[in-house]
Amino acid sequence: MRLRSTLIAMLAMPALLCASTALAQAKPQGGETKPLRGPWKPDLPLAKAYDASAKALALADDNPLIRWEYRVWCETGYRHPGEEGTGQVVDKPADFSRDLISPKGFFWPDRAETPMPPGGVRFLDNAWYFGVDGLGVVVVRTPDGLLVFDTMTNPEEFQRYVLDEMPAAGLDPKDITYVFLGHFHADHTGGANTIRRLAPKAKFVIGGPDARIIEQARADLEAGREPPRASSIVRGKRPTTPEGLEALRQSRLANLPAAPLDIEVTAQPGLMTGSAPIRTGPNTEVMAVLNPGHTPGQISVIVPVEHQGKIHKLLVFSGNDEPKQAAQYAISTDYLRAVADAQGADAFINTHAYQSAIFHHLRQLKANPAGPNPLLMGTDGVDRYLGVFANCQRAVRQRLADGTWQAW
């Protein structure tokens, strides 16, 4: 299935390859030893302190999303079956309907393809999640039109999992006015050109550095060149015939947003982070935040939403980790944390719904809309969620420097 191969390629890129410190490496008979990736020695003092800070934030209450962040980013990380080091035991989640990351940190992407229930999931009064368990799109209905956050992997998936399901939720794709592309990876940009055709007046928002990457990739593909940057937007099994090569080129172009990318979120002078208020209509203003780490131009967006007669601020996050950029990611997340606090963000969602096992809680809300909603975690919850992630990134950076962890 196409989605399966895409998820495997996309979600593997940033993952930490981690395992229990108790597992030993043993050289197989007649084979080469595969390195034990992840934690393999006890933390040294500074990494231990970062870990302790993250743990204290995670355990301040029983919100399962925040506790998942600590478990995966500080304790296990994740990797795929088949990527284990010699001697590492591959395990499975106890219940795939509740989590796709095993106790030892193995992510099972083939189980991340289950579509959301018909009509998506309305997780706040004017906010929906469409897609599959591993990857999706957030839609917020405002008085001024629909705001869309990310666009799946390709036009076909966007049509099937999002556009075809929106009418059942009472949403008309032609009402889309703004599209926020969380970062340049193909699993977030694949439906952008479809939106251009359906809602030609819609404006596109992206981080400035990622806009440059997309523009360069399109220019290279249009000129018949292979884009120089190794990224998901240009990968694919390379055919051997001229016809196959041309089909691959056209497919890549279809999945890359065409110009114009109307609004770019740029960094403040001397920094890699920045923010920009964007008025999406007379009645709505969002705050877009450049928080590089997963990609150079990753953005998050804080958008006003409604729930049970009250106004809330939803933080839409797009991505996961990148061990090589852990130091910058920690800084960026600190910045995002400060902006979220100033904006009063009190709800959180990631367009990768396998993160924090959000998919499970979305399904629970679909079955029982009046039940507990851990996404609506309060300002303190959003602050601690981001604090856990930032401190885990610091811990990872220090562990790699100390040589107590190994990452791919």
Image: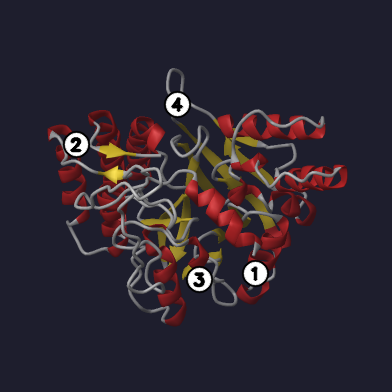
Vertical comparison of 279 with 271: above or below: below
Q: Mark 4: which amino acid?
A: Met
Q: How many marks?
A: 4
The percent position of residue 275, horizontal first and vertical second, equals 47, 34
Q: Mark 1: which amino acid?
A: Met
The residue pinned by badge 1 equals: 166
* Residue depth check, mark 4 versus mark 2: number of the one nearer the observer: 2
First in sequence: mark 2 vs mark 3 = 2
On the question of residue 142 being in view, the answer is: no
Give the distance between the C-alpha atoms of the residues marked 2 and 3, in whole angstroms: 39 Å
The image quadrant that residue 45 belongs to is top left
The image quadrant that residue 143 belongs to is bottom right
The residue pinned by badge 3 equals: 122
Which residue sits furthest right?
243
Q: Point out the image quarter for the C terminus.
A: top left
* Residue depth check, mark 2 versus mark 3: number of the one nearer the observer: 2
Q: For mark 2, does the 10 Å Cα neighbourhood hold few (<14), some (14 to 19), or many (20 or more) residues? A: many
Q: What secondary structure is marked by label 2?
A: helix
On the question of residue 153 being in view, the answer is: yes
The residue pinned by badge 2 equals: 47
Q: Is residue 25 toward the left or the right of residue 231 in the image?
A: left
Q: Mark 3: which amino acid?
A: Arg
Q: For mark 3, does the 10 Å Cα neighbourhood hold few (<14), some (14 to 19), or many (20 or more) residues? A: many
The percent position of residue 185, horizontal first and vertical second, equals 58, 44
Q: Mark 2: which amino acid?
A: Ala
The residue pinned by badge 4 equals: 272
Q: For mark 1, does the 10 Å Cα neighbourhood hold few (<14), some (14 to 19), or many (20 or more) residues? A: many
